[in-house]
Amino acid sequence: MIDLLPALRASAGTLAPVIPLVPLVLSVSEATGHIKSLLEDDSTLADCWVRGEVSDPRTYASGHTYFTLRDGESQLKCVLFKQKARGLEKLEHGRQYIVHGSVGVYEANGVYQFYVTDHRPLGVGELYQQFELLKSKLEADGLFATERKRPLPVWPKRIGIATSPQGAVIHDLKQVIGRRFPLVEVVLAPCQVQGAPAVPTIVASLQALQRAGCDVIVVARGGGSIEDLWAYNDEAVARAIAACGVPVVSAVGHETDFTIADFVADVRAATPSVAGELLVPDAAELRRQLASLTTRAERAVQAQLWTAQSDLVERAAALKRHLAMRLERADSRLTALNGRLAALSPLSVLARGYAVARDAVSGAVVRSVSEVCEGQELSVLVADGTLAARVSSVTRSAHYTPNRLVTQDT
Amino acid sequence: MSKKAQDVTFGEAMARLESIVSQLEEDESIGLEQALALYEQGLALADDCQQRLAAAKLRLTQIAVPPLASPAAEPA
């Protein structure tokens, strides 16, 4: 049709609009009548039970009741005429029903609707049966397998929460996370937590939180009746949790409530507060850890210092020992030298009976007879003292040869 | 450290501190100078972590959630 527009524009003025030569042109009534007969002749639609949540039932002055039956994805307009409503209980908004009737077309408005002849609220028994059916189906698909479960991040940076922006749940989560580990960022993606819109909004929230870069996501809801929690037993929600790119924590209802969402989630928290505890470490515990790490570091360094100190002491002692040894060695060497020195001393020669004659005045040693004359005073040194003597005569030895031993007296 | 303190997340700082402490406790080959340097680094990290815990205030943002795109466009 869009392709035709330029062609039509080009021909405007020269040619009248071309009416295709179709063999059959229907009036609105004829078309509607055809639709009506198609729908109303269908044997399935003529007599069936439909399951869904009743939304917004309104009874008008005529006594007829209009409402919408819906699930997560679709809705069906329903009419309950006054005559048929007799003996039936009043419809409750937000409750699950099975509704009996047939599909018809209301030509005046051009709409199809479901003409209700009977309805029954879904009891806990039926809901439970539905729950079990979905549970075994998803289990067979492997959605609950333990190997699918991912661990939660140890240090989450951005925590996504899919829940109602009002109420205790978001308040509790905020409180618990803020008290334990306020270093994280919390992102709330509001969704409905009950009624027909809950399912699509929960799924949309999960997707929005992934796009927001959360590294873990909590799907949370406070306690309520089984009907209140019903959205969390929906297949679309279960599949959205399974398909989530980051770990998901479920925290739906009270501790005793188990939903399909709990089975699919990576971690199930008994309550929203417990979810907060599972998600983030506790600052008080972290402070204790920090203190203990600091103490350990101190001890380790202290040990190093002690080792260094004892090394030092040891080396100082070794140095001292070394020095003492050297001193001792020097000492004994000195003693030995002293002995040798003593052996070489002329005094020891005197002990053997030699004497040294010296001039009494100058102290010069007498080496030759030529150095003395008769009457000269001499001092004669013997081993244990000196004698004063006077030269009475001088006799030169006839055989004296210098540098020779004086033993050749012949 | 190559990174500035602000660029390191709390988790990274804790992990670094833990590795410093075990290095101090277990690695006997490190000298006294290195041990003292590591110790100082460790203390600074611990202080930084404590301060972050004390100073942090939880940030909560609410994001808009666009409705699911349905396969067939719904009439308004």
Image (cartoon, coloured by chain):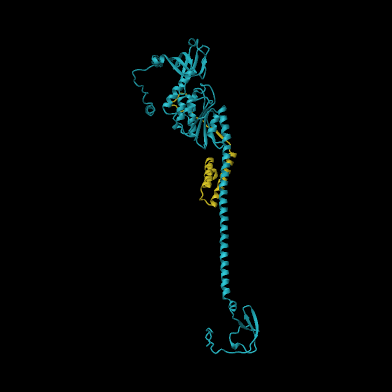
Q: Color used for chain A? A: cyan
Name the spot of residue A8 as percent of width and height, x first.
Answer: 38, 27
Q: Quadrant of residue A362?
A: bottom right
Q: Can residue A263 be seen in this view?
A: yes
Point out the residue furthest to the front here.
Answer: A410
Depicted A161 relative to depicted A101: above or below = below
Name the spot of residue A98 as percent of width and height, x first.
Answer: 46, 16
Name the spot of residue B45 as percent of width and height, x first.
Answer: 56, 44
Looking at the image, which residue is at 54% across and 30% down?
A274
Name the spot of residue A349 as percent of width and height, x first.
Answer: 58, 78
Q: Quadrant of residue A33?
A: top left
Q: Is residue A361 visible?
A: no
Q: Pick whichever, A235 or A326, lies toward us.
A: A326
Looking at the image, which residue is at 59% across and 88% down?
A369
Depicted B49 relative to depicted A339: above or below = above
In the displayed structure image, the side of residue A50 where residue A385 appears, left or right: right
Quadrant containing the N terminus of chain A is top left
Depicted A359 relative to depicted A188: above or below = below
Q: Which chain is yellow?
A: B
